[in-house]
Image: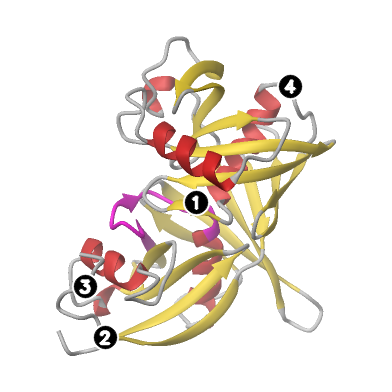
Amino acid sequence: MSEGIRFTKTQGAGNDFILVQESEMGMEPEQLARKICDRRFGIGADGLMAASVEGQGVRMRYWNADGSPAAVCGNGLRCFARYVVESGMAGGDTFLVRTDAGDRWVRLCRGTDGAILGVSVGMGRPVLMPYEIPALLPGSRVVERPLEAAGVSLRLSCLRVGVPHAVAFWDRDPTEEELCRIGRAVERHPAFPEGINFDIAMPLAEDVFRIFTWERGAGHTLACGTGCCAVAAAARLCGKSGGNSIRLEAEGGTLEVECRPGGELVLFGGAQLVGEGWFFPATESAAE
């Protein structure tokens, strides 16, 4: 294929994404995701998002770097919101984005000079029933449930915030080797038939946690919006936080989660446009 594909690269707290117009993809999205997200033979990113106008709104579709689809991405939604506003696809700073996990409201927050300071995203209520996560574990909720993975005894709290997450609270930071080895084992554990994202959270202060994430289909990422929401919800379920506003210190930056009455989670953080250009996918690459 010789014709190029226009792209925009964005990042939120170090979680980076490629955005394209769905009508201009030119190939199967799973194949394009693997090619364009490859960090040596492509542009490099944690995931690919496609934007399209649908009725009176905008639609986001998402694929991880390995080509697997995901219903939603919290950091991706913030970047997507900024992209569609600045590209003229959405009018106004507050609107709905249609995703495979349902409609999500987004709001761009601006300073007095009009500069975009960050984006808030309504992530909905976390799903706790094991069969809806899905997690093949006993009980009506999976809260600090013992599980062994990669030879390590874990206590996991599992929930779905658009996508499934398993959260473990540690009293220290994991090493890179630990995160990757355990994260890969948890993601592929038989208890999670659709795979799962894995988050390690360490309490730093009241309602403040450091978070490390292994993402299903992407591996170790510097931040994960749905992971931050999962940690905030799990911290309240486990009695490790009682606040309505929880700060998450990810490796790539700081994100905030507001826990509203009724259970809705609202994610806030930055979203930056990194660059734009044309991608010329080779007919063959190491990403295939």
**Chain-order first, disc 2 or disc 3:** 2
Image coordinates of residue 3 in percent, x first then y, are 20, 89
Task: Return the residue found at the far right.
Answer: 206
- Would you name the residue on which mark 2 appears? 280
| Residue found at x 41% / y 53% | 218
Q: Residue 48 carries which label?
A: none
| Residue found at x 64% / y 48% | 266
The answer to whether residue 241 is seen in the rendering is: yes
Image coordinates of residue 32 in percent, x first then y, are 25, 69
Query: Quadrant of residue 30 in the image?
Result: bottom left
**Chain-order first, disc 4 or disc 1:** 1
**Would residue 215 be found to the left or right of residue 206 on screen?**
left
Q: Quadrant for the N terminus, please.
A: bottom left
| Residue found at x 26% / y 88% | 4
| Residue found at x 49% / y 51% | 220
Q: Which mark is residue 239?
A: 4
- Would you name the residue on which mark 3 appears? 285
Position of 157 relative to 20 (above/below): above
- In space, the residues marked 4 and 3 are separated at their CA atoms by 48 Å
- In space, the residues marked 2 and 4 are separated at their CA atoms by 51 Å
- In space, the residues marked 1 and 3 are separated at their CA atoms by 22 Å
Q: Magenta stretch: residue 279 in it?
A: no
**Chain-order first, disc 1 or disc 3:** 1
Residue mark closest to the camera, 4 vs 1: 1
- Would you name the residue on which mark 1 appears? 220
Residues in magenta, as a range: 60-75
- In space, the residues marked 4 and 1 are separated at their CA atoms by 27 Å
Residue mark closest to the camera, 2 vs 3: 3
Between residues 123 and 93, which one lies in front from this camera angle? 123
Q: Quadrant for the C terminus, please.
A: bottom left
**Chain-order first, disc 4 or disc 3:** 4
Image coordinates of residue 56 in percent, x first then y, are 40, 67
